[in-house]
Image (cartoon, rainbow, N blue to C red):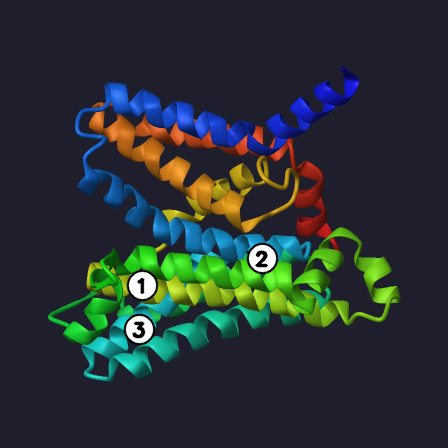
Amino acid sequence: MAVADLDWHTWLARYGTCLAGVVLFLAFALLAPNFLLLQNLSNIVQRSTFMALLGMGFALALLVAELDLSFANICSLAAVVVGGLIQSGHSPETAVLAGLAVGAGAGMLNGLLVTFLRIPSLIATLATASVATGFSFMITEGVAFVGQWDPRFLWIGRGTLLGIPALIFWLGVASLVALFLLKQTRLGFRMLATGEAGEATRLAGVNVRRIKIIGLALSGLAAGITAVLMTSNLASAAPDSASDLMLTSIAAVLLGMTMFEPGRPNIPGTLVGALMIGMLGNGLVLMGIQYYVQDILLGLIIVLSVASSASVLKKAAFSL
């Protein structure tokens, strides 16, 4: 009997949040007009893509016990770099590579500040966020890049691959790559070990500094990927393009830490968390509920999620 109870509690800890998501889906299916339309469901998934990608980057940084609060600002900076290059007539390939380089480079800078200057990641990434915002407004002079852009570039975020909307396809590819990295490679194992027992991992001969730099660089790279897809999908780039995604992306990761691998940042949990938050916003709008209700519920989600993973966040924010 005790074993059965233990199994039940374990199952509930791993999948209880998913079950709540199913209940939420059914509630909106019954109460929100047009919620079950295929086009609406596709829109939910596509609009959750940016949140999920940024969330995965944040999760990879958190996995090595570092807190990246600059990813949204880095994403906005990468977006205006991409948009500026496309608008000035450069090739899509050049613009995409530039966006990815800006993201990864800014993430690596965060890693160097944290590991070599020994600045807590909470402070270092806030400083990087401020610098990135300043450069974004300097490049655009406060005006968004908008225009008739190269169709090849717009296809990246608006086209279809094998009948699947491009955004969903790229999200699937990124998720599989991240899962393979964490579950099937030595680097992934070292990232997990660094986050859970950094000093023991260092004593075992692992270059913990390098692992932390990689984790933060991957967070920046995820921001760069998101910037490319967002700019292509919206055909515009503003200096604050991703500002609204910061809290929702963090919430997706925290919500994901309550399922599958409770207490640990994980890719499947982040994806489900992003979909749940995207579904929540969509359903509330269809029901005609005031927009501020979503902000209130998002705050509650963050508070409740942090309650189950406070030690992980504290270690990431203030470790030296």
Whole-percent x, y for residue 320 in the image: 76, 58
Q: Which residue is mark 1?
A: 229
Residue at the spot x=22%, y=58% of the render?
163
Tell me residue 221's x, y (percent).
48, 68
Residue position for label 3: 82
Find the distance from the CA under tag 2 to the CA under tag 3: 24 Å
Q: Residues within 10 Å of mark 1 (few under 14, many from 20)?
A: many
Q: Can residue 184 be seen from the camera position used here?
A: yes
Image position of 290 with respect to 43: above or below = above
Q: What's the residue at 67%, 24% (across, down)?
A: 9
Label 2, secondary structure: give it: helix
Outermost residue on the left side: it is 148
Measured along the vertical axis of the image, is residue 176 above or below residue 111? above
The amino acid on which the numbered mark 3 sits, given as a three-letter code, is Val
- Mark positioned earlier in the residue sequence (2 or 1): 2
Q: Is residue 142 visible?
A: no
Q: Residue at x 27, y 24 (%)?
A: 29
**144 to 153, vertically: above or below:** above
Q: Please give the name of the residue rendered at 24% of the width and 84% of the height, measured from the top-left corner.
A: 91
Q: Nearer the viewer, residue 152 or 144?
A: 152
The amino acid type, in three-letter code, at marker 1 is: Leu
Determine which of the numbered discs, if any, sits on residue 60 in the image: 2
* Three-letter residue code for mark 2: Leu
Q: Is residue 28 above or below residue 83?
A: above
